[in-house]
């Protein structure tokens, strides 16, 4: 059984106590992507992942420079935004990075306080506290830059009853495929450049009051050809978790190097979304055309009883079914988890998704790292980027 916890004798609760409370976060409010064609991207996320139409802003609502489509599934909100003019910074972002995550919005009680507390601790401002109002009330938003060109937006919506944000109208559609069982965002992973991981770990500690509760080095995360290092940052209540990866020396080019080359800088590598029934969710996603990484070898599944140890007795899933779908399983001191990773969802080998089901475990599948990265390397080899 893999042991991921940074300081096992104290447990996670003790570690989280080290987080500072000057920035209370209630959860992930939304994730906004800058994309080349938001209308078509929205259709993909509805068809493939089962998201539902929620809200829209664009020319028809009086917005002249962009179009934004908001999608929802359970507690997950995605915003897909595209530029309407050639001189737009949104378009420049897409030109450089391809489709990617621009804004990770965090739900807070007091956006002004969140901005003031983080900027005085060294954060670079993206947007000063701004009140946005319509007939449904008001919202306060403020933003700061994190790694690369990525932004954390603080969203205060306690005085708002509208569909999403002021300026957005309800988006009704005759085409709404059924959801696939995705519940909420479990964590979001950022890739940063050589030697930058500890810089951003310190930034999250100093600027946002997070704690580093799990750490992995290149001795734990490596294959024959490549390696990486990772540290997981979390806020005090554990609702927001941001692992940060950087490349490490290896015989060939790692997945992190490939991402940095094609994204042309640091950014969000993958979004992990939770489900209560991963077998049903993954079966549904596969039937809709979502592509996943190749299945680990038979020997991986034969070793599951040994990997789970005492947790094997509580396992409800059939190992043969997991193997058929390519779902991986791992355990820590508190339970087990099931996870699977999509291939990149765009032509640039950058952003992908993780589907995760936690059965007590609070780790990130350290026992799966070797099998996972070997699978990624097989895809890199096909692309000629290994």
Image (cartoon, helix red, strand yellow):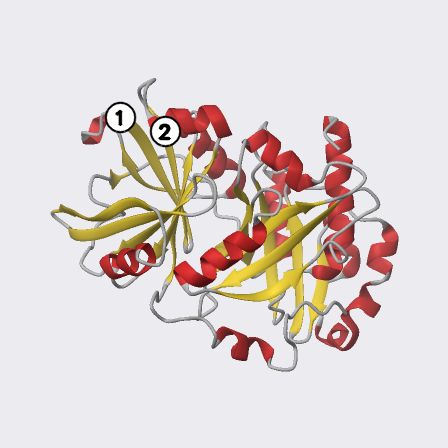
Q: Are marks 2 and 1 in contact (CB under 8 Å)?
A: yes
For the N terminus, give its image quadrant. Answer: bottom right
From the top left corner, tell me how far across and down residue 325 is, in percent. Answer: 72, 48
Query: Marks 2 and 1, Cα distance to the nearest angstrom?
Result: 9 Å
How many marks do you count on the picture?
A: 2
Q: Nearer the viewer, residue 125 or 322?
A: 125
Residue 302 image label: none
Say whether residue 309 is left or right of residue 44: right
Q: Nearer the viewer, residue 107 or 150?
A: 150
Specify the quadrant that holds the C terminus: top right
| Precedes in sequence: disc 2 or disc 1 | 1
Q: Considering the numbered disc 1 on the image, is that residue within a helix, a strand or a loop?
A: loop
Q: Nearer the viewer, residue 138 or 11?
A: 11
Q: Is residue 87 above or below residue 302?
A: above
Q: Position of residue 248 (x, y in %)?
A: 70, 46
> Which residue corresponds to the image point at 67% horizontal and 53% vertical from the top-left?
229
State whether residue 316 appears in this view: no
User: Tag 2: Cα neighbours inside 10 Å, few (<14), some, or many (≥20)?
Assistant: many
Q: Residue at x 61, y 38 (%)?
A: 290
Q: Quadrant of residue 309?
A: bottom right
Residue underneath mark 1: 65
Which of discs 2 and 1 lies nearer the camera? The answer is 2
| Residue 78: percent from left, percent from top | 41, 44
Q: Quadrant of residue 261?
A: top right
Q: Which mark is residue 90?
A: 2
| Residue 202 spot, x, y in % from top left | 50, 59
Residue lying at 54% horizontally and 75% vertically, measured from the top left: 15
Residue at the top extreme, as displayed: 86
Vertical arrangement, residue 223 with respect to residue 211, above or below = above
Residue at the left extreme of this rendering: 135
| Left-right relation of 129 to 366 | left
């Amino acid at each position: 059984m893999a042991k991921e916890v940074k300081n096992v004798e104290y447990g996670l609760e003790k570690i989280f106590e080290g987080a500072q409370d000057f920035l209370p976060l209630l959860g992930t409010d939304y994730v906004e992507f800058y994309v080349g064609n938001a209308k078509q991207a929205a259709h993909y996320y509805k068809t493939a992942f089962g998201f539902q139409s929620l809200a829209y802003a664009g020319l028809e609502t009086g917005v002249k420079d962009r179009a934004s489509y908001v999608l929802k599934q359970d507690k997950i909100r995605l915003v897909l935004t595209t530029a309407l003019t050639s001189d737009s910074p949104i378009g420049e972002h897409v030109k450089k990075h391809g489709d990617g995550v621009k804004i990770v919005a965090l739900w807070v009680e007091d956006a002004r306080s969140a901005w003031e507390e983080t900027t005085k601790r060294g954060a670079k401002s993206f947007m000063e506290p701004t009140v946005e109002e319509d007939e449904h009330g008001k919202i306060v938003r403020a933003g700061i830059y994190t790694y690369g060109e990525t932004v954390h937006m603080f969203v205060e919506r306690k005085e708002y009853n509208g569909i999403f944000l002021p300026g957005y109208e309800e988006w009704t559609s005759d085409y709404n495929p059924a959801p696939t069982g995705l519940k909420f965002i479990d964590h979001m992973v950022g890739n940063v450049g050589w030697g930058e991981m500890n810089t951003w770990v310190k930034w999250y500690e100093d600027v946002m009051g997070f704690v580093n509760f799990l750490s992995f080095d290149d001795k734990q995360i490596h294959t024959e050809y490549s390696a990486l290092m990772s540290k997981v940052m979390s806020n005090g209540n554990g609702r927001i978790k941001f692992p940060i990866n950087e490349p490490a020396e290896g015989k060939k080019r790692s997945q992190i190097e490939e991402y940095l080359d094609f994204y042309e800088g640091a950014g969000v590598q993958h979004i992990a979304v939770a489900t209560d029934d991963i077998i049903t969710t993954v079966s549904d996603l596969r039937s809709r055309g979502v592509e996943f990484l190749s299945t680990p070898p038979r020997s991986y599944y034969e070793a599951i009883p040994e990997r789970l140890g005492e947790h094997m007795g509580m396992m409800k899933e059939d190992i043969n079914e997991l193997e058929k779908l390519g779902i991986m399983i791992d355990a820590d001191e508190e339970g087990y988890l099931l996870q699977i990773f999509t291939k990149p969802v765009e032509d640039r080998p950058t952003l992908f998704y993780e589907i995760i089901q936690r059965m007590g475990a609070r780790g990130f599948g350290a026992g799966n790292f070797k099998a996972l990265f070997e699978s990624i390397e097989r895809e890199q080899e096909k692309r000629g980027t290994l």
